[in-house]
Image: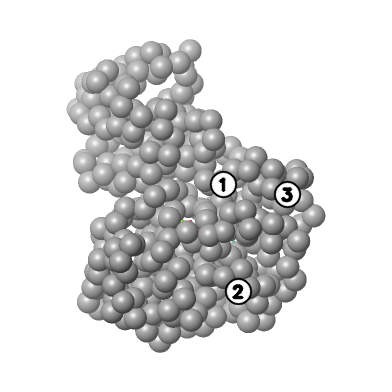
Amino acid sequence: MKTTLRKMESKAIDGEALREAAAIIREGGLVAFPTETVYGLGADALRPDAAKKIYEAKGRPSDNPLIVHVCEFGELAAIAKALPPEAELLAEAFWPGPLTMVVWKNDRVPYATTGGMDTVAVRMPDHPVALALIRESGCLIAAPSANTSGKPSPTEAAHVALDLDGKIPLILDGGAVGIGIESTILDLTEETPMILRPGYITKEMIEEVLQKEVRVDPGIIGDSADRKPKAPGMKYRHYAPKADLMLVEGEEAAVIQKINELAAEKRRDGRKAGVIATDETKGRYEADYVVSIGARTDEDAIARHLYKILREFDELEVDVIYSESFATPRIGGAIMNRLMKAAGHRILTVE
Ligand code: TXA
Ligand code: MG
């Protein structure tokens, strides 16, 4: 299959490309499109045959459910069995935006979309191209991240092309995404709402809107072998770079010294080391490759650059990557969740 890439300016959406994309979705085909978090691989959410194509193109396990993207709140009500009162409050506060809500599904949603689950995950993306595509197609669009299963989520159209060229007919290129890590997933099917995947919308932000306590799925904290995460996708070791990744945390000077020691050791063994640093520390490392993820004070930039950097290291032939730790104040939890998974939970604490 030939894959076409079409540029889509957010401010002046190309009507012809949009109509072409919408027609593909309506016919049960696949289109990759930008959202504010990461690029999505879309298909008609209410057609099992269309949903199946997503799993094939990504090489995704079929028990891992898809997120359904909507452009109006009413569309959530139309596929939910019953709407929890929290949903409306949260949609008002955060939609369109990077919050996915899990609710009980009704019969309109096929099990092919929900990976056999009786619940469905729904979000309204905050991106003009994504919203226009949903509206123009007249469909609800099921879309996982548009990467090959096991690769970092794509934050640019070029990443999608690298993974899915020849497997899908169309990629809408809306430039680099704004947020760079996937949406927060919140389960609303139990008495107490529970975060299944941390993201840009934090626990504190949700608690403030709901005026009640929110839990975090114990299955996603640390390297818990004892409890299965409730979001099936969180159990897979996603985002695993080719090289071994190790995080080093602690006081800045000690971290730099430790990483330099480890990199020198690798070099003596004839192996190549890379370092994920920050603007502030980049010049103080000695390794084969040192890249900055952004300014340490700019946590949005750290989130935005993370996946791109992991992909870059896959291109450079390094054997090991050492990374500083980014437990930043607001979205540090979400950033570290992704990094810890990429590192297989290998973290070294230095004094
Ligand atoms: O930001 C995002 O959410 C992006 C963009 C494209 O919208 N999408 C995304 O989709 O990250 P994906 O498929 O890569 O991740 C979806 C996650 C998986 O971990 C999946 O297991 C979980 O959502 N999920 C989906 N439906 C669920 C459900 N009914 N119950 C629990 N977890 C669910
Ligand atoms: Mg994904």
Q: Residue furthest right?
A: 191
Give the residue at mark 2: 75
The answer to which of marks 2 and 1 sits earlier in the sequence is 2
- Label 1 within 8 A of ligand 1 by Cβ: no
Picture residue at 35% right of the left edge, 42% below the top? 305
Q: How many marks?
A: 3
Picture residue at 20% right of the left edge, 29% below the top? 288
Tell whether label 3 touches label 1 (CB within 8 Å).
no
Q: Amino acid at mark 1?
A: Ile
The CA distance from mark 2 to mark 1 is: 22 Å
The answer to which of marks 3 and 2 sits earlier in the sequence is 2
Q: Nearer the viewer, residue 141 or 133?
A: 133
- Relative to 349, say whether 103 is above or below: below
- In what element is the residue under mark 2? helix
Give the residue at mark 1: 201
Picture residue at 28% right of the left edge, 79% below the top? 16
The CA distance from mark 3 to mark 2 is: 22 Å
Give the residue at mark 3: 210
Q: Is residue 241 visible?
A: no
- Label 3 within 8 A of ligand 1 by Cβ: no
- In what element is the residue under mark 1? loop
